[in-house]
Structure formats: structure tokens, C-alpha cells
Image: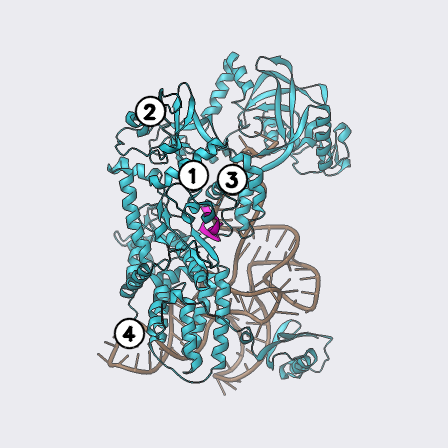
Amino acid sequence: MTGRFEPAVAERRWQARWDEQQSFVADSQSAKPKTYVLEMFPYPSGRIHMGHVRNYTMGDVIARFRRMQGHEVLHPMGWDAFGMPAENAAMERKVHPGEWTRANIAAMRDQLKRLGFALDWSRELATCDPDYYGHEQALFLDLFDAGLVYRKESEVNWDPVDMTVLANEQVIDGKGWRSGAQVERRKLAQWFLKITDFAEELLAGLGTLDAWPDKVRLMQENWIGKSRGLQFAFRLAQPVAAGDRIEVFTTRPDTIFGASFVAIAAEHPLALAVSAVDPEAARFIEQCRAGGTSAAEIETAEKKGYLAPLEAVHPLDAAWKLPVYIANFVLMDYGTGAIFGVPGHDQRDFEFAKSYQLPIKRVVAPSANEASQPIGKDPDCDPGIAVNSQFLDGMTSAQATAEVIRRAETAGWGQGTTAWRLRDWGVSRQRYWGTPIPIIHCPTCGAVPVPRDQLPVVLPEDVSFELPGNPLDRHDAWRLVDCPECGGQARRETDTLDTFVDSSWYFIRFASQPKDRPFDRAEAEAWLPVAQYIGGVEHAILHLLYARFWTRALQHIGRLSISEPFKGLFTQGMVTHETFVSEDGRWLAPDEVEAGAGGALVERATGTNATSGRVEKMSKSRRNTVDPEPIVAKYGADAVRWFMLSDSPPERDLEWSESGIEGAARFVQRVWRLSTTPKDGEGRDATLDKKLHRAVAATGEAIDGLQFNKAVAQSYELVNAIEKAAPSASRTEAIQALIRLIAPMAPHLAEEAWATIGQAGMVTEAAWPSFDPALLLDDQVTIAVQINGKLRDKLTAPRGLDRAATEALALASEKVQRQLAGASPRKVIVVPDRLVNIVA
RNA sequence: GCGGACGUGGCGGAAUGGUAGACGCUGGAGACUUAAAAUCUUCUGCCCCAAACAGGGCGUGCGGGUUCAAGUCCCGCCGUCCGCACCA
């Protein structure tokens, strides 16, 4: 039996077999060690892209590898199915978001199945299914009962045309990304989750996540942004109605004698009080509001202030009065919304002081004798020695900081505190296609939770997207209900939950899905935490932080005993492809470009010059995407999987190339030929035995470390060695082992080959090959001989030769003798079984 | 601005401080074939010398340093990419 391996036929057949045998259905009751492998679930956009293929292939290799090692593996798949694209589709194509979403799920499910992933489809879930979001509503109410949910007025970006709240990313140049309307800042009552209650825990917990990339832990650490400092109040020289003090926070209390001014945010209560009586101030505050929120605008915004008719008294010198400005660079929602400005030692304060001719004083210097050095054209932000600071003079910045905090606490005008960059998580979205927030607003009873026996609060199906805004606001049959407490006329909350809430607990629901509650604690804990979580680095902060918070919140209310959901995390690189640009700067698809006369690129349609752009992430806008489906149809799922794992290390970007996928397809056929061309023989082949055992050891180690490119290289080496070997019992065994080594990566080929060589059962159920450590070492070793660190000769010697004998052997080398030319070496370094370095 | 990662042949990339370039791709030469595809064999970092055999030199972004020995460790640059950003 020879010929080509026909993926189109064989792959379908094995996929059907796995399905019939329920090969990948995870048994929560199993006595085997349990492993939970998870890839970030996809948004059902309509089609699988290469990034999905790469992501899910990696997870699949781990899942199949652990199975072969005797683990009970949970490897589920589902759909992050709520979100805006469905509503946009509804508006554009007049289809219901649910209909659009479910059609996409069906299409993508088929595409995933065609790739032969070892997924437990019996646990499939979609977050837009009331079966899922109803349990989410129950969990939301649990958190509500525990006081972790609250409602607060907060500023949002409001699009007056679409009548919806926009995320910061959706505001472009101060205009709505869809409507193009000028975005307004508006105050809206919104629901918040108290993630800040867990700031300290979430920060400390990062320390336990040693199987996470350092990069991600660092990003989360910065996002949480803990800073220690001093919070204290400036007394106002003349109290006003809105108050007699300004609370400020600083991380540099050691610079307190360098203060030149106090600045408050435009939204600060005192600023508002001033503006009420001062139209000039009101105008300035209005200007600050109009300022955009985008990073670019913030960066270029000039530091401006308005001198308020207030005077602040320095806490350490009652005679020292500081001017108070309303300033555009002070943020109301960080710290206290007010600062004291130290121009000598802070960049922003420096710029502000320059504009408004405020004193710039040195209070920190590299050394005590540089106290009179003026501050130059840049502020000095480094720690140093306190100078010009009365009782602090001579102290280091750290000592001075501690001393100021101590005095403030003793005298009672301030105290050491911690400020966090992390804010509470606003979860209200004024959208239809999301989980309804299970709250009823009653004019007499206030916000009342929907009784548990009335869950799920199901989205109404009969909605129209003809008008802008949230259709739930217009749906009176759904919206108007009786208050569960007093029975009076009330209305449902029409905001839905941020979709990040949906993805904050799906991994728990995968592990355990009882009908009547979100999850069974014992069953969930049997699987959790996820042993290996794999996804894109773009989720390094939000999703991963929210999921960590949700898990801890469940722990806090006694629903779960684990504190971290993901033990191992891996962030894979993107799939990239070359790009092409036309003469007039349009992106061109690869098949719109050809080599013209003289080899230069030209645009096929027009014959004008084209250039190859950079290799970039596949995206529709750059027109450099490659759709996986036709590629799978042409080369087979195994070849595509194999290519996704080859060449590039998984954390780096992988460049898609035609020659790469062809190479992978070639490898599939090589393995097929080896398995279908019987060359059985007798006796051992010691060289091949060693090669095999090394390949088994190295492949296992590589997969364990998620170094799939190295595992792939090992398979190539083993295949090369088997092809060169003469028939022997060793060769026959090597082929059997090879098939198992490639099974996690190219499972269909492995099954077909396994059956062909006459092995019973499926390779999916076979055990991972073992190796004999004794065979990992050679009897003969090559010893490198260096003179002054330069390689001069290579000698073959029996392994285990002692230092003296090794040295003698090296010195006897003809090449060494020639190089030394009679001189005797000054020193000889011997590393047994490896090398000899002769210092001449 | 702050933080992080990376820099090795024509390309993707290997290398517990100890033989740089595994493996793949590309390319060259040859075999098989009427021919092509497929497949197989073989070569493929650069330079010098040489008919060949052999031999030699240079090489991991740049400049220093530590070491018997540096792609790997340390210091200083340059470049590319990513994240965050008026955070007090």
C-alpha cells in the first residue's frame, strides 16, 4: 500500500471516528490526573482566521500530548458571542443580532471541526445563550448582595446622534467613530464593580504566577499602579462656602519645601464653586471639558491654568501662602484631584511654572554642596539629598520622605497613604446585544435585584434597530414591570453588561455546567485552575485582570476556593504576511501584483509600479489576509497545523508563506511514505536507537516548554535518520514511535499511519513513547581542541576519559603540535567529554 | 517621557559561559523520466590560497570589559518592535 496521503478523505474519516468514540469528552469523575487546557474563546465574527488556527493548534498540541501522557484533559470551546459587531450588522443588513451571531457560530464551528482539534464539544457554550447569561445574572446578584456592585454618576463619552456611550477607543478626533458627531461628556448613572477592593490582592497575586510571561505580569502591575505617598490638606487662607481645605496626594513629600503653587482639576468641587461666581473661570472649565481624550491630544495639549481667587497655606509654614490654579493637567479621578506643584523636580509642574512665571526652587541636589545650583532647562527628578528644606537638609530623599510623613501624622495634618491607578470597573453599556443587568428601578424602593426565581432576564427578540439608541429603552412591554418589593410600577434596567463580564467566568462554566446554578463548586475545583491558557497578548491587561478579579470575588463570597484562574499563561505571536502598495498608495492583495519586465513589481490591473511593504499582521484593511479554509482544502489540516508550529518560536510572529505550507505538506507525505513502505528487518541499529531515544526526550521536553518549533525540528531529524537507516527491528520501532511523536501535531496523519502499520486502537489513545536515559549518551564523544580559545582540532574519544588522558590526547594532536611549534603550553583547561583549551 | 522585548547566513530560526549556524525554506549541481511534476543524492555564512587534496583568515548590530573561553555575563551606544502615558 503506497501512494499519496489524501488529507481530504482521511481527515474527515478520523474526525468522524473521534466524534463517534467521544474521544475528547472530559470525564470530571476520572481518577487520572486532570489537566485543563484552554485557548481564549473566539468572537463569532463569521470566519476563522489564521490567528485562530495558530492559537488553537498550540492548545491542541498540549491537550493531545497530556492525554497521551495519561491525563484526563478538559479542552473545551465556546463563543464570546455578545458585542457590538452584531448590532452593527443588524443596522446594516437588517438582520437580528442573534440570528447573525448564531449563523456565524455555525460556520465557524464547522471550520474548527475541519481542523481536527481535540475539543470537548459537549461543553460548547455561547455567552448570548440565556442558559449562560442567566447564570451570569445570578453571579452578578451574588456580588451585589456582597456589596461589590454599586451605582454611581460618572462621565461618559456620549454620541448624540447614535444616542449611545462610546468607549475611549471609539472617539476619534473628538467625534464618534460611526456617526462622526461631536462627542459630548455626559454624566450618567452607571454600574460599577469594586475591583479596587482587590487591588492589593491582585497585585500580590501576580507574584504567585510564575508560569506567566514576565511581560504580562509587569503590564498588570503598571496598570494597577500602586504608589505610596503622603495625603495631606492645604488650609485655605480665607475659607469659602465649598470648603476650607484642599486635599492633595504626593509621592514626593521630600520636595514639600519646593512647592510653588497648588493646582486643582477642572471638575474639583472648589473649581466648580469658583466658576459659579466667576464667569471667566466657568469658561476655562468649559474649555478643559472640550479637550479630547485621545492619547495624541493629551500629549500635545498645552498646560494651562486659571488663577483662582484662593490662597493655600503651607502646612509647615503658616506665613507661606501659595497661589491656587484650576489646571487642565490635573485629573479628578486620580489621587484627590489636586496637587501641589514642585517645578524644580517634576516635569509637568516645571512646564506650568515656566508658562506662569512661578518660582522654580531647588530642594533636592545630587550632593549637599550643590544646593545653590539653579535648576537648568530641565527639572531634576532624580532622588538625591534634601537641600534648602529646613529640618530636612542633608537627608536622602527616602529619609526625608519618611520624616515628612512622620511629622504630618504626628501633627495631624496628613498621613501616609497608597494611591492606585486602578479604577473601579464600569460595566454598564447602553446596548441591546449583551447580558441584561438584573435590576429593577422602583421610584419608592430604588434599585431592586430581580428575584432569583425570575432569572434569567431574557432579552426580548422583537426589537428594531431602525432608530438610533438602545432598543431596550423603547421596548415598554419588556421594560415596564412591577417592583418585586412593593409591587408598584417600576422599570427594568435597560443597560447591559460589558462583554468582558461574560469572559470573566466562562472557564468556570466550561468546567462545570449544572442546569440550575452557575457551576458546581466541587466539579469546578476538580479542573481549575486552568493549567495552560493560551491567547493573544492584546488581552494581557483587561480580560486577564477582570477574570482574576472575578475569581477572587467568587472566592471572597465563598463560592470557590481558588484565587487565581490561570496557572500557566502563554501569549502567542501574530500571523503576519507581506504587504504590497500601489503607486498611489493603495494596499494591494498579493494576487494583484506580479513581477513585470526587469523583475520590478507592477500592479496587474494597471501595469503601474507597485512596491512590497512591510511584513505586517494579517488584516482586512492591509489586504494581506490568507483565509484558512481554502488552504486547508488544498493542503489538509495536518499540513496547516504543522506549518503553524514550525519555524517561528510560538511567542514571536509567524510569517505566512506559500513555500512554508508546501514544506509542511511535503513532510506529511514523507511520514506517510515511511509508514506505508514496509522495510521490516531483524536486529538492532544502535545509532538509530540513540537517535530515537534522543528525539523522544527532546520532543517531550520541547512540548512541555511550549517550544513547538523545536519539537517540529526533532521530528525532521528523526525522519531524516529513519530514511537513512537500513531495515532492522530498531527501524520498525522508530517508525512506531515517530507516529506517536507527531500525533499531537498532525493527528489525522498519525491515525492513518498508525492503522496502516497494523497497530490496534487509535493513536489518540496510545501512550506517549518513553525513552531510556542511558541511550541519550554516546559511547564516543567529540572533543573540541582549542588553542587560546580558537578551535584547532576535533578528536573522537571514548566517553568518560579522565582529565589527564584527555589532555594527553589533545597535546598529541598533529594540528596542535604544528600550532604550538615546539613551545610548551602555559596552561591547559580540560572539560571532560567536551573540550580542551590550551593556553599558549 | 516611562517600562519591556528583540538584533545570529539570502530568509525563518538552533545553540546548560565550552565545537556558532541544528532543523526548515530558498538556491546550485546531479539521478530517475520521452518530458514535466513528485521523489532521491549532494552542495549551500563570507573571504584568501589551491587544479585537487589540504590549509588559513573573518564572522552573532556597534564600542569597551570580565573570563582559559562570550551569541550567551557586565558597562556604554545604535536600531527595530510592543505596552503605558498629564498618575502627582
- Whichever of labels 3 and 2 marks the residue nearer the N terminus, that label is 2
Q: Amino acid at mark 3?
A: Gly
* Residue bounds of the magenta highlight: A524-538
Q: Secondary structure at mark 2?
A: strand
- Whichever of labels 1 and 4 marks the residue nearer the N terminus, that label is 4
Q: Which mark is residue A501?
A: 1
Q: Secondary structure at mark 4?
A: loop
Disc 1: host chain: A
* Image vertical order of residue A80 relative to residue A151, above or below: below
Of residues A376 and A305, the one nearer the viewer is: A305
Residue at figure coordinates x 57%, y 80% from the top left:
A779
Q: CA distance from mark 2 to mark 4?
A: 70 Å
Q: Dividing the picture into quarters, in which one does residue A262 lie? A: top right
Please tell me how crowded label 4 is: few (under 14), some (14-19), or many (20+) other residues with Cα within 10 Å. few
- Which label lies toward us, 2 or 1? 2
Specify whether residue A584 is in view. yes
